[in-house]
Amino acid sequence: MEEMEARLKSRMDAMDRRLANRMASLDARLGETTTVGIQKGVAVCAESAGGRSATRRFAVCVGLRKVVYDSLAELPGCPIDVDRFACALEKMKFPNGSVVVLKDENATCRAVYTAILGAAETLESGDLFVLLVSGHGGRESWCLYDGKATNRQIVWMLSRFRKGVRILIVNDQCHSGAFFAPKRDCEVSPFEIICRNDGCDDSWEPSVVWSSPDFPMVMQFASCRGEQQSADGLAGGSWTQALIDTLHQKLCVEGRRCSYGEWFDTAKLSPLLNHGEQDPECVESPNVVDSFRSAPALT
């Protein structure tokens, strides 16, 4: 088993090095973006052509092998998903300080909430927030280390972002396609208490907020339909790996970037997925526009 894990790690390290080399080559040839600074923990970039301000980007990567409030089976691939996805973001020019990693006992309700709200306080219209969540999932909840975050509470948290902010959620959990159909619920957990203390009381109606034109644009790459489960393994979750492999194929083999739409459509056909048992879905808020779907992925 240790020998197998060592071989898998060696292959993933080699893939990451090839991706880094290809990205450096593309940047030198195309002159797309250069990092010019960090502001409040979020990368500030400038277009090399014309010196125009470009998208600020921030990411939070959450992965849990297990939780403390339930005897659910351990998922050894989820922390690996976080490491590999965070590495892919860095190769896509998310500088140091713009990617927050929360794994296992560090992925508490308070830590996840704080990290996401920190991005919400900083990002403006047109900026990009990326969230990876890899672990156990309920039909309408994320299973964090010390409690669940329900659909309603997650919509509340996302509503803290300003209008026009683009949000990509990579949800590699069982039943992930069930998001988002906001409902009123009464799940009691540390996450529910945090949200309630911040103003998410019984009078707050998530379905109205979700449909509002002032809600940020949310695009979720769900690993499976609402009634399905997601595959996990020693090398990571099948869906996260399919997405990373697709980026690698487009950049390192084809020498180009792909749009969000092409990224999802290509990854969902990956042979890593057991189709019929795990069928990814792209779930969007009502205000997502075509310019978001067609933009170069992760920019």
Image (cartoon, rainbow, N blue to C red):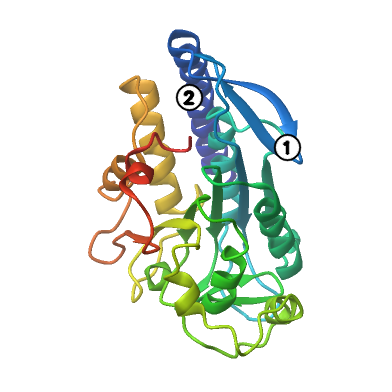
For the view shown, which residue lies furthest in the top direction? 29
Task: Judge whether residue 271 can be spotted in this image.
Answer: no
Q: Is residue 152 left or right of residue 196?
A: left
> In the figure, 129 relative to 220: above or below?
above
The number of numbered discs placed on residues in the rendered structure image is 2
Q: Position of residue 151 (x, y in %)?
A: 52, 76
Cα–Cα gap, marks 2 and 1: 20 Å
Residue nearest the viewer, comparing 228 with 178:
178
Q: Position of residue 200 (x, y in %)?
A: 66, 80
> In the figure, 58 relative to 148: above or below?
above
The kind of secondary structure element at disc 2 is helix
The disc labelled 2 sits on which kind of residue? Leu
The disc labelled 1 sits on which kind of residue? Gly
Q: Is residue 108 left or right of residue 132?
A: right
Q: Label 1: which residue?
A: 97
Circle nearer the N terminus (2, 1): 2
Determine which quarter of the picture holds residue 110.
bottom right
Q: Position of residue 261 (x, y in %)?
A: 31, 44
> In the figure, 24 relative to 185: above or below?
above
* Number of residues whose C-alpha sits closer than 10 Å to that of mark 2, classed few (under 14), some (14–19) or many (20 or more): many
At x 37% / y 28%, what residue is drawn?
Answer: 257
Disc nearest the viewer among 2 and 1: 1
At x 56% / y 48%, what residue is drawn?
Answer: 129
Q: Label 2: which residue?
A: 19
Residue nearest the viewer, comparing 113 with 146:
113
Determine which quarter of the picture holds residue 246.
top left
